[in-house]
Amino acid sequence: MMTLDDTEMLVTRHGVQLHVRPARDEDEPALATFFANVSPQDLRFRFLTSVRAVSHERLSGMIQANDATSESLIAFGSDGSVLAAAMLAGDNRKDTAEAAIAIRHDMKAQGIGWTLLDHLVGHAKRMGYRTIEALEDRDNRSAITIEREMGFEPHPVDGDPMLVRLTRNIA
C-alpha cells in the first residue's frame, strides 16, 4: 500500500505530482495493473522484445532489483495508482548504469519521462557511476528526443540496426 509519507515527491513541468519510491514485494499487483495499461508498442520499447503481458517472473525480478547496483522505482499518482516504473541497473565496477522507463499510456506527454530520467541521472551520479545510458528501439522517437535534449549522445549498437545506445557522462 502506497502512503505519501514513504515517497519522494517529484513534480513534472506540466504539474503532475509523482510520488516515487523503490518497488516492494506488495507492489506486484499494482505493477501488473500498470503494465496492463502500457501500450503494446511501449511494452516493446521498454523490454526490447514483443510481450503481451508482463509475467510474474519479470515483475518479481523488477521488484527484487533494489540492491547496491540497481534500483527499481515506482511513480504513483496522488490517487495511489502507478503512473510509471523506472529502473536503474548498474555494473559492479560502478562504470555504467542503464536507465529504463515505462509510462502508463494515458499519462504520456506530461513530462513524466523527463522528470524520471533526470531523477535516475541524479541517482546514478550519487551511486558513483561515471556514465548513464539508455538502450532504445530506433522507433522510440519520443524517448530518444528527451534523452538527446538531456545531453545523451546516440551510438549504434553493433549487430542490431534497430537499436541505438544513448550515453551521457555524469562523473
Image: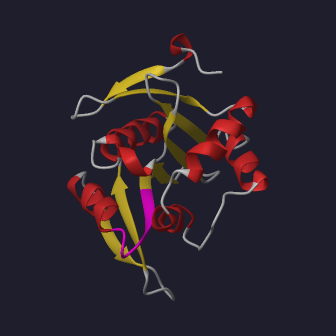
Residue placed furthest toward the right: 57
The percent position of residue 2, horizontal first and vertical second, equals: 59, 21
Residue ID at (57%, 64%): 47
Tell me the quarter of the image containing the C terminus: top left
User: Is residue 24 at all visible to an observer of this figure?
Assistant: yes
User: Is residue 89 at all visible to an observer of this figure?
Assistant: no
The percent position of residue 146, horizontal first and vertical second, equals: 27, 55
* Vertical comparison of 163 with 111: above or below: below
The percent position of residue 93, horizontal first and vertical second, equals: 60, 52
Assess whether residue 43 is covered by the magenta stretch: no
The magenta region covers 133-140
Left or right of 33: which side holds 156?
A: left
In the depicted view, which residue is nearer to us: 35 or 124?
35
Residue ID at (47%, 51%): 101
The percent position of residue 63, horizontal first and vertical second, equals: 69, 41
Residue ID at (59%, 73%): 50
The rendered magenta stretch, by its main secondary structure, is classed as: strand
* Vertical comparison of 51 with 83: above or below: below
